[in-house]
Amino acid sequence: MKVSIKTPARLHLGLIDMNGDLGRMFGGLGVGIDHPNVILTAETASEFSVTGQEVELTRNLAERFFSKYQIQPKVHINVTHMIPSHVGLGSGTQLAMAVAFALTKIFKIKTSIPELALAMGRSKRTSVGTLIFQKGGFVVDGGKNLKTNAFPPLIYRHPFPKEWRFVITVPNQNKGLSNSEETNTFDKLTKMPSCDVAKICRLTMLKLLPALSEQDIQSFGEALTQIQILTGNHFAQAQGGTYCSPISSKCIDFMKEIGVYGVGQSSWGPALYAVVKQEQAKPTLKKIKKYLEKSVGGEAFIARANNNGAKVKVIED
């Protein structure tokens, strides 16, 4: 048997509740995008082997799966494409879920996506990345239950408008936090004031989501930018400002100046994004690339939404 998987990437658009006094924490907002991608194949073999990109990480993920499900590993995994790691585009979750889901097919293991995510050590705070792997689109999860530590439930999903685009910018600077460094940072954060949580909830429920349903890009962008500022201000105690660096702040200001509808930082960055209409995307990209060339350098690209989740192909022997 051979299984091929191509995942979306994800933009993390903010956290709803960093207070937790209602018994839940976090609650994520996110959207799937069509590239970059994790692309891999897994096929039955005489012994276990891994080739391609991120060999050590892929091997560790597979061995975690084998240990959890008590599998004798006889499979070859080849990773041909990877999402850049630690830049805010969700590479860790997409690779982990792609490896695990491919192995469930190879070894005919019946389990749910939420169960698989928890088994692979994902969804520790939000389930946004896992939900985007599964379904794509724009998603909101209901936060982590502090008593049960269960998989954060999906409470909203909507296809992202096909006429809208993201212009994604990754300026040359340090990569974002991950793994133990990220966990330690979360542990040190103070509680978000309940009044700020209330503002984020109100912006989400009464502006962001209705604007998405009505395809009102102006209101969507305004709400998203405000949510990002509230979230970023809370994380300033860890990253030194509303965004992950002065470089990012200046880049965000530039994107606002050239007339995009909404801006933000995905996760810990350094990936930044601007929301634009389809016809704006190429002119906006050109201006951002010129800005990067004159300042810090980096890359920028246009992405459209992925509204379907990972693409899976199974070839039986």
Image: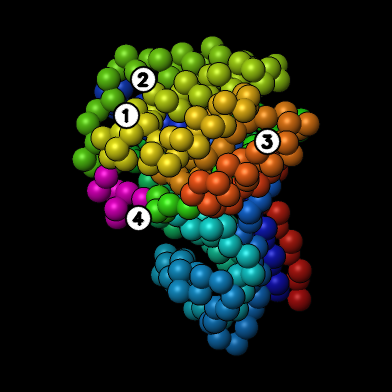
Binning the other alpha carbons within 10 Å of mark 2 as few (below 14), some (14 to 19) or many (20 upward) gives many
Query: In the structure shown, which secondary structural element does the residue marked by tag 3 occupy?
Result: helix
229 is higher (above) or lower (below) than 185: above
Residue 234, label in figure: 1
Of marks 3 and 1, the one in the foreground: 3
Q: Position of residue 224 (x, y in %)?
A: 53, 24
Q: Position of residue 252 (x, y in %)?
A: 50, 33
Quarter placement of the N terminus: bottom right
- Amino acid type, mark 1: His
Q: Seen in the image, is 162 located left or right of residue 28? A: right
Per the image, the residue denoted by label 4 is 179
Per the image, the residue denoted by label 3 is 284
Q: Earlier in the sequence, mark 2 or mark 3?
A: 2
Q: Earlier in the sequence, mark 4 or mark 3?
A: 4
Query: In the structure shown, which secondary structural element does the residue marked by tag 4 occupy?
Result: helix
Query: Given contact means CB atoms under 8 Å apart, are the residues at marks 2 and 1 in contact?
Result: no
Q: Position of residue 5 (x, y in %)?
A: 67, 61
